[in-house]
Image (spheres, helix red, strand yellow):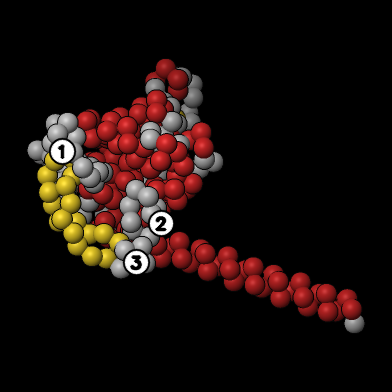
Amino acid sequence: MKDKRITKFCLICATVVTCITLGINLCFQRSTKAVITEFSEASTTATADLITSIGETARQIGQERNLYASVMIAQAILESNSGQSVLSQPPYYNFFGIKGSYNGNSVTMLTWEDDGNGNAYEVHQAFRTYNSLSDSLNDYANLLSWDLYSGTWKSNTTSYQDATAALTGLYATDTSYADKLNALIEQYGLTTYDSPMITEETVGADNSNYVWNHYRGSYTTVAILAEDEAWIDFVSR
């Protein structure tokens, strides 16, 4: 009788764990789907173009500044609506929605905020303006180099998920900020930019694991190229 009770208890525990796991997976899938749906309103081509245009610069900055390039790119996509927001366009070049002024330059715009409980409201805010995309990327790196954002540094984290979690409620008031960034990083395979750039020299003539990926404008693994091709095929249907 005792053995039967123990077995029954173990089965109940296993069922509970399974339900919790399925629930977590379902929530992540819904979050990913919501982000993909949100960005399907923006041109998929625009998103791909933005990744291509800032990917290698973000990779270099990430390597030099102890930051995740994947998070940087995902934030640029999210904050600038794939480079299509007014704030990210010339003459402002603010791809990260950074507030305040830069070298005395700013522009006031209406923006959405979250009260911390998932309730959105509108408010006028001053945002930094830059002379170029490069200035925007480097100022972002400068901002995240503050001790306030030490929770996003590679040296203080085990993965990009730790960094996105640290940004939520700090960089942005959106309570779903980490989920949105994680979904973008996963969907577009942005973690490839967290590693040093692969060049023709490092690949080697006899290494068949790396190929030229014209979607990213750089060498990637065969698996990354296959994922990119599958994604392009999916969104083109």
Identify residue for label 3: 118
Image coordinates for residue 24, horizontal then vertical, percent: 52, 64
Res. 72 mark: none
How many angstroms separate mark 3 from mark 2 (CA)?
Answer: 13 Å
| Contact check, label 1 and label 3, Cβ < 8 Å | no
Image coordinates for residue 215, horizontal then vertical, percent: 30, 38
- Type of amino acid under label 3: Gly
3 vs 2, front mark: 3
Identify residue for label 2: 179
Identify residue for label 1: 129
Which residue is depicted at the point 22% across and 30% down? 134
- The secondary structure type at the circle numbered 1 is loop
**Above or below — where is 129 with respect to 45?**
above
Viewer-proximal residue, 131 or 121? 121
The residue positioned farthest toward the bottom in the image shown? 1
Which residue is depicted at the point 13% across and 52% down? 109
- The C terminus - image quarter: bottom left
Which residue is depicted at the point 51% across and 37% down? 156
Image coordinates for residue 103, horizontal then vertical, percent: 17, 31
The residue positioned farthest toward the top in the image shown? 201
**Image quadrant of residue 73?**
top left
Q: Is residue 170 visible?
A: yes
- Type of amino acid under label 1: Thr
The residue positioned farthest toward the left in the image shown? 91
- Type of amino acid under label 2: Asp
Mark 1 or mark 3: name the one nearer the start of the chain: 3
Which residue is depicted at the point 27% across and 33% down? 139
How many angstroms separate mark 1 from mark 3 (CA)?
Answer: 28 Å
- The secondary structure type at the circle numbered 2 is helix
